[in-house]
Image (spheres, grey):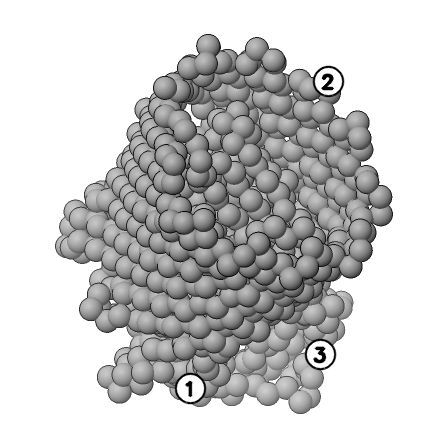
Amino acid sequence: MGNLAIPVLLINSKTLYQSGSLRLNDILSEQTGLMITDNFGKGIQMQGLSSEYTLVLLDGEPLIGRTGGVLDLSRITIRNIRKVEIIKGPSSSLYGSEAMGGVINIITDGAGQHKTDASIRFGRFGSIDGAINYARKYKKTDIQLASNYNRSEGYSLKPFAVQKTVEPFWKAAHQLNINHLISERWKAGAGLRFNNTHIDNSISVQNLGSTITSKGFEKNQEYNITPFIQYQVDKKIKSVLRGYITGFHARQQLDVKDAYGSYNDKFNQLFARVEQQTDIHPTEQSTLTLGAGLIKEQVSSNRYDSLSTLRNNQIAYLFAQHEYAVNEQLTIIGGVRFDANKAYASVLSPKFSFQYKLNRCLNFNASYGRGFKAPDFRQLYLNFTNLAAGAYSVFGTEVATAEINRMSAAMMLEQTTDMFSKLSVLKPETSGGLNLGVQYIHPQKIQFNLNLFRNDLSNMIVTDVIAFKKNGGQIYSYFNLKRALTQGAEINLSKQFINVLNIQAGYQYLYTADKDVVDAIKDGKVFQRNQSNNLVSRMGLNEYGGLPYRSRHSGNIKFYYQHVKGFFATSRLMYRGRWGTMDLDGNGLINRADEFAKGHLQLNCSAGIQIKQQIKLMAGVDNVLNYKDLINLPGNPGRVGYIDLQFNF
Amino acid sequence: MNRSIIFAFALLSSLFFIACEKEENASGPNSTLTSNLVKDLVADTIVGLANGQPVGVGKYTFYSLENNAIVPSSDSNSTKWDIAFRGTSILTNAGTSGPGAGGAFVYTGAYDELKTVSPDSVFRKDSAPSSFAIPSGSNKGWYVYDPVNNLITPIPGRVLVIKTAKGNYAKIEIINYYKGGTTPAPSSSDDIKLKTQRFYTFRFAHQANGTASFQ
């Protein structure tokens, strides 16, 4: 990535190991300014932007298979991860769609290693995690093989419930990478990865005293194929041609124990890409990156039409970035990317950044970039009717008009709303993001950095009612309507004490708002209802709690102790301030105290020892304080202990 | 089985013990303006499931704002009632709903700040089945429906401005849709949410002298 003037957070393999993290969400939840959300899996919230606006890359290639916009981070094992790179702020100028809030790049064990290790972990709730990594380096070829298996019996936060809070699951991942040096100038390689998730389902719904239970499973299968060929023209020019094919197949099957029959939901996604990137160093002071690519995306689902109807999108894109060191102090980077899409409007995403080194200790950076997120297939093609909850329907914009006309002809409609006439081709959601930072590195191993950020989002896609059915059910479709902003400050401080103790502390202040709501509040058109006396009053701006699921305050303090003889201990305390969860007083906004989830502390501890060269033993306890919140944190089971054994052959 | 007996009993008792309280009169004993609080007005409470959907018996509860009392449904084709409730649907006595000179519109603002009905106000009339003076639907009229938690909540700052069957003015603020004037917790069972809904708590002011003033 190598983009100096943009805040990048690196998490190395030592921290990954010592933190006792198994899945990607585990380690991200301990970083300043990153929140893990628990809706459709473990999502990430960065600079106040939700999961759908963060691009997740595995060795530089985007992962697909989102549900409700959320890419479930618990799908990803970090047992074979060398480092995690996190870029905050819009990065669409290089990465295109979804890189609005930022980019998370997971880098698996690199080439050139020579190791064999096996590890096994036992934890609470019958959880087992086993991993094998094998890497060999021959004269011209290197090869890596990694396997991971993870299972848990799940848990129930509600005693005696039929349905567990987290159902039993198993996950398996296998990865093979081969790189070969053909000649001094030519290098080629390929990667292959399979990832499987299986979750038991037993769902129980209460309906007027009668309990309807259904049993079944949820299954995700994912594969990634990554061939590449690299040509080093000379010392100044390097060119890479990369191919990428990935598929995601999700299936949920439930057998309902009564007349409703069985429920079978299938979703298949294919993403194929060819990308050519050339890096040129015309002078010592400058680097030019040029690239172009073609993407083909395909989705089929019985949520849309039938599985046999394939929905396609094709994207052709060009990008260029120029990094130029004006002098010893000042570096300027300018970049731009153009995405031409078949299914929706084209987008131009520029980005400018600069870094100014005042002296050896102090440097400043600033960047402004545009980001975008393409409308997803659900927003274009969904054709969904929920018979269980109010018989409402949701139609994607590309199918809505035809569906409404069909239902109207069949006399199924009561009326259409004025929003129906406003249905139009969806545009990508866009953002503009500004980051201003200062970094101070003292020779005595003190580091301090402050980053101020602001993201302005527009054309955000929301649902609205386009028609009412005769039976009273509502029909929804999608519109580019919402404008929002997120802004705040992030501070990180770290100090190393005599090579054995590292202390880190971080804090993020975050303000978020729907801009139309702010306007309405300023116009005096927004009211709230007092919880105790039911009296209605006009709402003030200071009572507006912003976008849901955002914490105004969050922070952490982390201790890492490393003894020379291989003993280590860590203690990481994370704080997440209260966050809005739902509207209770009917104004659709977060404002009343009871509309927030309580703030809480999470303390994770671990300790380990290296026995000779071969054996590493670790034990840890996550959530030492045993904090639980059944409603707002279903993914947090309370205190969890584990022991972990790693053997290096 | 026990549950349904308790439920039926709760339903019956609520029908008999609807409390209609009189609040203070706004401006002295001779004023023609009356202010009232109505608690737990039953609006076709749910009796069972049909095709998986909760249903009531389908009957409106008719109410006279002039007399602050329930009107028997046998008088539904008269000018004795001003407003009628069935689930989240609200009728006014005009248009397709009744022979009265009524009408209504939904005003955005604070109840107490609505001191007079503006002369340029347009009172809508019911035109079943597609259009009602007080629109039904989430976020379209007086309430929002939360599909995640299955709860109906009146929107704060919405006042129903009513023309009674006789043509007098009234204003209504719906305070709650659940029994006892308390919305169940979002985490409570669907059972509780279904059994306690369709009980209106609302306050209204009625001006008997034909003027548009609520002072």
Q: Is residue A607 left or right of residue A641?
A: right
Helix, strand, or loop for circle 2? loop
Give percent across and percent down for residue A61. Answer: 43, 54
Report the chain holding disc 1: B
Q: Confirm or deny contact between disc 3 and disc 2 (CB under 8 A).
A: no
Give percent across and percent down for residue A351. Answer: 65, 65
Helix, strand, or loop for circle 3? loop
Give the residue at mark 1. B127
Mark 3: amino acid: Thr
Give percent across and percent down for residue A394. Answer: 36, 69
Helix, strand, or loop for circle 1? loop
- The first of marks 3 and 1 along the sequence is 3
Please check whether the numbered discs 3 and 2 fall on a single chain: no
Query: What label does residue B116 carry, if any?
Result: 3
Mark 2: amino acid: Ile
Give the residue at mark 2. A498
The answer to whether residue A478 is seen in the rendering is no
Q: Is residue A507 left or right of residue A295?
A: right
Mark 2 or 1, closer to the camera:
2
Report the chain holding disc 2: A
> Which of B18/A33 is in front?
A33
Query: Where is the C terminus of chain A found, in terms of image quarters?
Result: top left
Mark 3 or 1, closer to the camera:
1
> Which of B149/B122 is in front?
B149
Mark 1: amino acid: Ser
CA separation, marks 3 and 2?
Answer: 76 Å
Q: Quadrant of residue A121?
A: top left
Give percent across and percent down for residue A225. Answer: 33, 52
Q: Residues within 10 Å of mark 3 (few under 14, many from 20)?
A: few
| Relative height, residue A277 to residue A130 (above, below) | below
Q: Confirm or deny contact between disc 2 and disc 1 (CB under 8 A).
A: no
